[in-house]
Image (tube, rainbow, N blue to C red):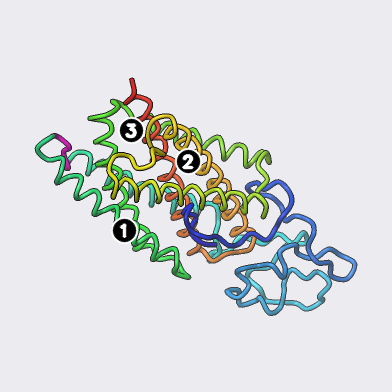
Amino acid sequence: MRSSNPVFSRRGFSRDNGHAQFNAAPQAGGPAVGTQQGNPYAGGNPYAGQNPYAGQNPYAQGDQQTYANPYAQDQYGVQAPTTDRMTMDDVVMRTATTLGTLIVTAALAWWFLPVDAANMGKSYGIAVGAGLVAMVLALVQSFKRKASPALILAYAALEGVFLGVVSNVVDTHIANGAAMQAVIGTMAVFTAVLVAYKAGWIRVNRRFYGFVMAAAMGFVLLMAVNLLFAVFGGGDGLGFRSGGLGIIFGIIGVLLGACFLALDFKQVEDGIAYGAPREESWLAAFGLTMTLVWIYMEFLRLIAILQGDD
């Protein structure tokens, strides 16, 4: 399981069919052993190499060997809870820690980096610098094979500084109350996607993954081109981030963020089902944080466009 930044690649999708949902029992379709159905994750487990018992499959119900395996399964092939495997509680705690760090630094930046006319340049410069460093840290973590809690928390802290200043600028000079509205919008999207995912209304399979990644790469490419035109040509570049086009692309950005939340939930579910190491919960928290930041920024931009035109 890797980071879920909408720009970065993912792995860990091995089940193509069925409604994905939290705490779902292992689905049918795995290789059969003997006359009984074997583990549907056997042969497709991305964490098999990290499991000291991977060479002697404890899921194989046709095998009569007896293992002294602390990860033993019950008669239905459900893995028993262990202390070194990722659980939902681990993901919730790591995500709360990462988001909490981001929120605290955002609040500090809001209060201690004023955005009045006299201090705007200095505060904005600090915010841009923090954002660039955060992006570098995110790239480093995304290409690392293992989670680095210190790196992830550093990213969250610096990203919080960036968001705090930008939110203050928008809230003070463009649209009063925009930051709180963006927070409420982000929470609403998160809740809606979670409910839809648990209810099985969202089918997260390879086709869904491919469509979302293609759409995200196209979106990012267009925004990069728009940014280049804005830097070298002035104004808002091609106009993708202002006016009517800005509203359309803002809505698309929010929808893409919602799709990436579904992919994040699927990765968490698969990591728990596969018996991923506990450290993978940090990657899950990292991915969820980046996706929520994406959605928040799109909401903030949308609100600034809508209220700025009034």
Q: Position of residue 221 (x, y in %)?
A: 46, 52
Sooner in the amino-acid sequence: mark 2 or mark 1: 1
Mark 1 Cα-neighbour bin, 10 Å: few <14, some 14–19, many ≥20 = some
The residue type indicated by label 2 comes to Gly
Closer to the camera in the image, 265 or 306? 306
What residue does disc 2 label? 253
Residue 11 falls left or right of residue 157: right
Q: Position of residue 181 (x, y in %)?
A: 38, 29
Q: Position of residue 158 (x, y in %)?
A: 29, 53
The alpha-carbon separation of the residues under discs 2 and 1 comes to 26 Å
Please identify the quarter of the rendering in which residue 177 is found. Answer: top left
Which element is circle 2 on? helix
Residue at the image position 40 percent from the left and 45 percent from the top: 293
Range drawn in magenta = 112-116
Sooner in the amino-acid sequence: mark 3 or mark 2: 3
Which element is circle 3 on? helix
Q: Position of residue 186 (x, y in %)?
A: 44, 36
Sooner in the amino-acid sequence: mark 3 or mark 1: 1
What residue does disc 3 label? 179
Q: Give the total of numbered labels.
A: 3
Residue at the image position 50 percent from the left and 43 percent from the top: 257
Residue at the image position 63 percent from the left and 47 percent from the top: 22
Residue 30 within the segment the image draws in magenta = no
Seen from this angle, which residue lies furthest right? 35
Closer to the camera in the image, 23 or 173? 173
Which element is circle 1 on? helix
What residue does disc 1 label? 154
